[in-house]
Image (cartoon, grey):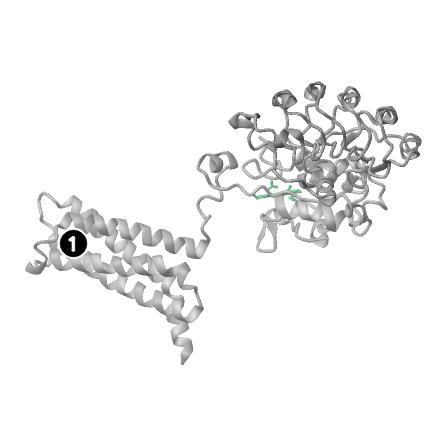
């Protein structure tokens, strides 16, 4: 007989609408009749049934909670306010009946209180059945932002190292469609008779037939919809929804033009790496600039490597380079000239533990994408470091255990992008005379201890 209880619980969403109707009607009549007081009997009738049905809603709600495994944290507000709605409705009814015990309670207090708890209870109940974002979800992203509602930016993220091995369809295309199209084109909500949650659905097309055509001289429906101006009714996704990015459109175009293959990987299809760079997480380029360059040709890279320098791309498909002289202890200003060949490509340069001097700044100032510069354990004093202020990406300078001197510190105040300068173990860090303005305090890391050999390299 247990099922009876389950059934009772299931009636809750139906029954709750009765008290809302009765009580609102009663409240409206109270206002309407507040002067003449000719209809008190019928008003009491409304509140009688309002109270009675509220009790029904509370009981079925409690049964629903017990039987269907809702979490207390989720329903507590709704349940408590539901009980409170009953209390307000019942008291108001008794007051209207003329019970003298209620003389002290003002009718306005009970009336307004009832309106309030009724609205809030209903709203919390709605959140439970439809989800918290039920009312805010349809708002356009700009308005959401203005209201302070978090707009989850749904964007595909690929890893530079592995994206080549992904199937173009399942690894790239479907995730994009999942984020931007499937909310309306899925088995529960099949707009235009089109399923986009799997390959089969996409291939079957919608009410108007195929959305992907093998012929290249007629535009496939899927591309036509995407390319329509945003204002057009048939534009996809509809204009109020989060739009496809330029990069997403490009990649969908490529896929359709290639005949919408299901299994082929990105590398098998020989797609240009450029198509994918905007899907790499910012963490991949990290602090480095996100710029497009032609890769340095291999013979140049080899000639730089020939003296023992380590040269590595920032990540597998990146043209940007990290260069380190860690294995070339006799590396000096003259050998540094070799780096000129990679002028635009160097973003991370490690010249720690080498023989370079302050003269090296004349060269380094030309590396216009340089982001990280390491000069630990060198004889650098800082004379000429002001030349680096034209480097608009230079964010980190490691001068640990170098000879960097305090007077040159302020030259760096003018560097446009500077975030961290490590100065442990330099004359500057031991100097008691340096006074760094407040806004630069977090940039210049002095420490007051000497780091051991290992630690200064990893900074
Ligand atoms: C907000 C809901 C919604 C979203 C999101 C959405 N669509 Fe649609 N789509 C519709 C509706 C409604 C129709 C049917 C009316 C029409 O044809 O414009 C439709 C129809 C289509 C059709 C035509 C199907 C046919 O045969 O009639 C295509 C193709 C399509 N959508 C592609 C897309 C693509 C691609 C995306 C994602 C980039 C997308 N849709 C996202 C609501 C949506």
- The quarter of the rendered structure image containing the N terminus is bottom left
**Residue depicted at x 83% and y 35%:** 325
The residue that disc 1 covers is: 43
Q: Residue lying farthest bottom?
A: 1
Assign a secondary structure to mark 1: helix
Between 444 and 238, the residue placed more toward the observer is 444
Give 28 or 346, whichever is nearer the viewer: 346
Q: Is residue 70 shown above or below 190?
A: below
Above or below: residue 77 compared with residue 394 = below
Residue 176: quadrant of the picture: top right
Say which quarter of the image contains residue 308: top right
Q: Is residue 12 visible?
A: yes
> Quarter of the image containing the C terminus?
top right
Does 254 sit left or right of 177 as displayed? Answer: right
Find residue 347 and report its horizontal and vertical position in percent. Answer: 75, 31
Name which quarter of the figure residue 152 lies in: top right
Q: Nearer the viewer, residue 26 or 424?
A: 424
Image x and y of residue 373, in percent: 73, 31
Question: 102 or 280, which is in the foreground?
Answer: 280
Residue 419 seen in the current view: no
Q: Give above or below for 286 relative to 188.
A: above
């Amino acid at each position: 007989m247990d099922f009876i209880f389950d059934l009772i619980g299931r009636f809750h969403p139906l029954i709750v609408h009765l008290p809302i109707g009765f009580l609102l009607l009663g409240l409206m009549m109270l206002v309407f009749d507040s002067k003449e007081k000719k209809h008190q009997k019928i008003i009491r009738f409304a509140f009688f049934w309002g109270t009675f049905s509220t009790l029904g809603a509370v009981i079925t709600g409690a049964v629903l909670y017990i039987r269907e495994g809702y979490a207390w944290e989720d329903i507590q507000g709704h349940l408590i306010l539901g009980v409170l709605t009953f209390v307000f409705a019942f008291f108001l009814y008794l007051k209207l009946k003329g019970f003298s015990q209620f003389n002290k309670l003002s009718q306005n207090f009970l009336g307004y209180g009832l309106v309030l708890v009724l609205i809030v209870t209903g709203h919390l109940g709605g959140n439970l059945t439809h989800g918290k974002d039920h009312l805010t979800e349809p708002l356009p992203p700009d308005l959401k932002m203005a209201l302070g509602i978090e707009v989850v930016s749904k964007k595909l993220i690929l890893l530079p190292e592995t994206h080549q091995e992904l199937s173009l369809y399942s690894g790239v295309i479907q995730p994009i469609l999942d984020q931007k199209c499937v909310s309306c084109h899925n088995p529960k909500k099949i707009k235009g008779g089109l399923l986009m949650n799997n390959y089969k659905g996409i291939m079957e097309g919608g009410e108007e037939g195929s959305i992907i055509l093998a012929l290249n001289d007629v535009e496939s429906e899927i591309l036509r919809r995407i390319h329509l101006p945003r204002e057009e009714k048939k534009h996809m996704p509809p204009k109020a929804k989060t739009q496809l990015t330029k990069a997403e459109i490009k990649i969908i175009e490529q896929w359709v033009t290639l005949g919408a293959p299901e299994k082929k990987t990105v590398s098998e299809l020989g797609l240009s790496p450029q198509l994918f760079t905007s899907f790499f997480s910012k963490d991949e380029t990290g602090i480095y600039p996100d710029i497009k360059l032609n890769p340095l040709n291999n013979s140049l890279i080899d000639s730089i490597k020939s003296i023992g320098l380590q040269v590595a791309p920032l990540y597998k498909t990146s043209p940007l380079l990290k260069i380190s002289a860690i294995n070339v202890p006799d590396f000096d200003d003259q050998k540094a000239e070799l780096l000129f060949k990679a002028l635009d490509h160097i973003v991370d340069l490690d010249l720690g533990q080498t023989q370079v001097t302050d003269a090296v700044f004349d060269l380094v100032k030309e590396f216009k994408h340089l982001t990280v510069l390491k000069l630990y354990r060198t004889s650098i004093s800082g004379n000429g470091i002001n030349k680096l202020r034209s480097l608009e990406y230079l964010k980190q300078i490691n001068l640990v255990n170098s000879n960097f001197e305090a007077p040159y510190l302020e030259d760096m105040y003018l560097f446009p992008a500077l975030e961290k300068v490590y100065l442990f173990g330099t004359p500057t860090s031991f100097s008691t005379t340096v006074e760094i303005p407040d806004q630069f305090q977090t940039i210049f890391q002095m420490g007051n201890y000497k780091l051991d050999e290992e630690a200064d390299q990893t900074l």
